[in-house]
Structure formats: structure tokens, C-alpha cells
Amino acid sequence: MIDGVNAVERKFIRAAVLAVACVLAMPWLCSCGGGNNNDDELLALTAENGKVYDEAGFEVSLRGVNAGGLFVTEHWMTGFVYGSSPSNDFRSLSQTFIERFGKERTIELWEIYRQNWWSDVDFRNCAEMGINVIRLPFTYMNIDFDAVENFDNAGKNYDFSAIESFVDEAAEYGIYTILDMHGAYGSQNGQDHSGQIFDSVEDVTFYSDEKLTGLTVDLWQAIAEHFKDNPAVAGYDILNEPGEKAGQTGEKHWAFYDRVYDAIRSTGDEHIVIFESCWDGRNLPSTDKYGWENCMYSFHHYAGDKLSHEDYCASWDNKIADVESFNFGVPLQMGEFTNYTSLENWRYTLNLMNDKGWHWTSWTYKVWGKMAWGVYNVMGANEDKVNASTDSYDEIIAKFSKLKTQDAEKYAFSDGTTLESVIKQYAAKK
């Protein structure tokens, strides 16, 4: 593996490696998967000996953001009225739209929503931020929309076009995509970010319901079959915050992970498989227990925003130390985090993860309202939020048009420093 070279040296060495590979007719190394053959093509990634490498042998540090809110609505961050009927989860909103406007117009509505929430401007912003990865949260409904109303037709009509378009456009800007299943069939945690809200942990039956788990395993197998030859996919994040009501995980969760892992590998897919804890080291097994290879372990950390700087830093130090104490021997990722309104805390945690060799994706690129949760803030008024039950079709489209990043503000700390500039600084550091 090739370490210790700067970006310019890396570019020319990689170009030379690819040129030799093509001359020697080694398609496994020179193939670029449907793009233009140039120096900036993304190469497939592999996890080995605790690090991530591309096909030319260069170590890659994945640093970026989440595309939260694009495929998965969350009431607090995506411009829907909170506390109204229906519940502000993707499934309830979709069902209401279908009842009011029909299925085809509902699909059209969500396409318009996505076009406004994320466009070429956002890919360009991410590239200018210097990041090299975007974690893309999605649910089964974004691929299997027939399952929104019920599961009678689930698994019969997959549509990968929207997600594939995102992956391809990100790749044009030299950015990898992590495919992150935020919501499994029936919901693995009953939270709005899974696509379906439940009142209590008892309502989460995913892990004991073979129909739900089976549909999810089948979907992952189909995803792998579809994307297995696409080097722009950095890896597959099997399940976001997998514990019931986003709680702790144990053997029943790992057994499900193992089924998905086997389904992915059965297609011949060699992408990195990402297993979420999502909280602590003890919530994931040794890879030897199941024979997992070419994988990454991912964690989330949201330290209290009211902590003193010293206590905040201690919280992060303890989190990193806890996970590393298990000596998993795989690359480690902080898949979600924010550091709220403290510039000092942002600088500390990003520097800490870089020093420790962790991969990271902050939550998130864009939110509704002035919040350090997002690099960009949509500054709409309350009356600009969508009420799915009462707004007309045209009113909803008009409100979606106000979600454009061109009309949003960059989040800035009290001294005027933007979060964008901070991420750019640490994304580029060795």
C-alpha cells in the first residue's frame, strides 16, 4: 500500500498505475464504470488491516457529510409542519399524499421535493468543501414505493433510478457515496428517520418478523446486484441506528447483519460493508464471530450541547477510547455527529478523529432553520412549511421551491467563521 505522498504525487502515481493497467489489459484496475477515463475517476475501495485503500493502492480517508433530509424526511429539519396529522414520517406523508392526489402525482411530488432539496449546486458545494464522501440515507420506500401503502406488492418492483442518479452525479465531482439504509421494511427503530414513527419500543417488531427482515435482506441483495460494479459507491451501511427506538444492539441484531452480509456477498459484490453499533464498542462483535471481511464499523456520537468545553472533549475522548479498546481491526467511522454551536468543539473533534485515523460524515449538509446541525440553513418562515393534509398540490410545490440551497444561508459561528470552512479545513488535513 502507498502512504506518505501528497495529493499531487498521488494524482500522477495513480495515473501511471492506471495507464500501465490499461496497457496490460487489466480491466479490474483500469475500468472506470461508465464515466470518462481520466485521472479523477473514482476507484473501488477496499477495507484491509484497519484502513481503506483504493484499487491503485492509495490509502483513502473518507471525510464528508450526510445528505440528510433528501430521501428521508425528519420533522425538525425538512420543512413539514410538526405536530399535525399525519405524523411527519415519510410513510405517513406519502400515504396522505396518495389518498389526496393519487400514487403517480405523489411520486411526482417527491421528485420535485428532491430536486429542490438537492441539486447540482449542492454537489458543487460539497466538492468545493473538499470532502470526498457523502453518506446517503434512504429507506426501502425510495426503491420500493409500492410498499408504502402495504407490503402485498413489496419486493416486486424496485426502482434504483433516484439513488443511482445521486451516486453518478456525486462521482462527477469526485465524491464517493455511502448507501445508508435509514429505514428497513416496517422500521428497525420506530423513529421518524426510519420512515415510520412508533410510540414505544414494544411496537418495533422488525427483528422478530420474518416477513420484514426477509424483505430487507432481499432488498440488500438487489442493491448489491445493481451497484456491485459501481466504484463510486464507497460502501453499504446496512442499517442506521439499528437498536429498537435507537437503543443498544446485541446478538439478534448481529445475526440480522450476518444475513445481509451473506446476501450481499452472494452476488459477487466486493464493496465495503458497514456495520453500525450505533453507540458503543460493546454493541458490535469481533469480525471473527461471523467471518466478516472487507468491512467497516460505524458509530454515532451526540455529546450534550450544554457541556463545558472540557467535559465535551472528555466525552469524545472517552467515546473514541472505548471503541478502540475492542481492537476490532477494521476501519472505524463516525457516521453521524454534530458539535452544535461551539467552534472550539468542532475544531477539537475533527482534529481528534483525523489524528486517530477515523473516517467521518457530519450530520448533516442541510437543515431547515438556523442550526449548526447543517452546513446550510433553509431560512423559511413557519407559513412556508408544508401541511400535507391541507395544502393544495400547487401550494406544496410552491413551498418545496423555497428549499433551494441558493436561497439558504451558510451556518456561521459567533465570530463569523462558517461551518463549511471548518469542514473544508479538516477534510483536507492528513
Image (cartoon, rainbow, N blue to C red):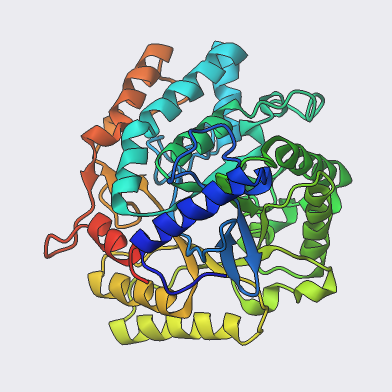
Name the foreground residue: 131 vs 416. Answer: 131
Name the foreground residue: 116 vs 62. Answer: 62
Left or right: 111 with respect to 312? right
Q: Quadrant of residue 415?
A: bottom left
Image point 41% across, 74% down: which residue? 354
In the rendered image, the residue lying farthest to the right is 210
Image point 43% across, 46% down: which residue? 39
In the rendered image, the residue lying farthest to the front is 23
Which quadrant: the C terminus? bottom left
Seen in the picture, residue 9 relative to 311 is either above or below; the reply is: above
Left or right: 223 with respect to 262? left
Give the image location of residue 230, x and y in percent: 62, 40
Name the foreground residue: 17 vs 43. Answer: 17
Give the image location of residue 304, x and y in percent: 40, 73
Seen in the picture, residue 192 relative to 81 is either above or below; the reply is: below
Image point 36% across, 67% down: which residue? 6
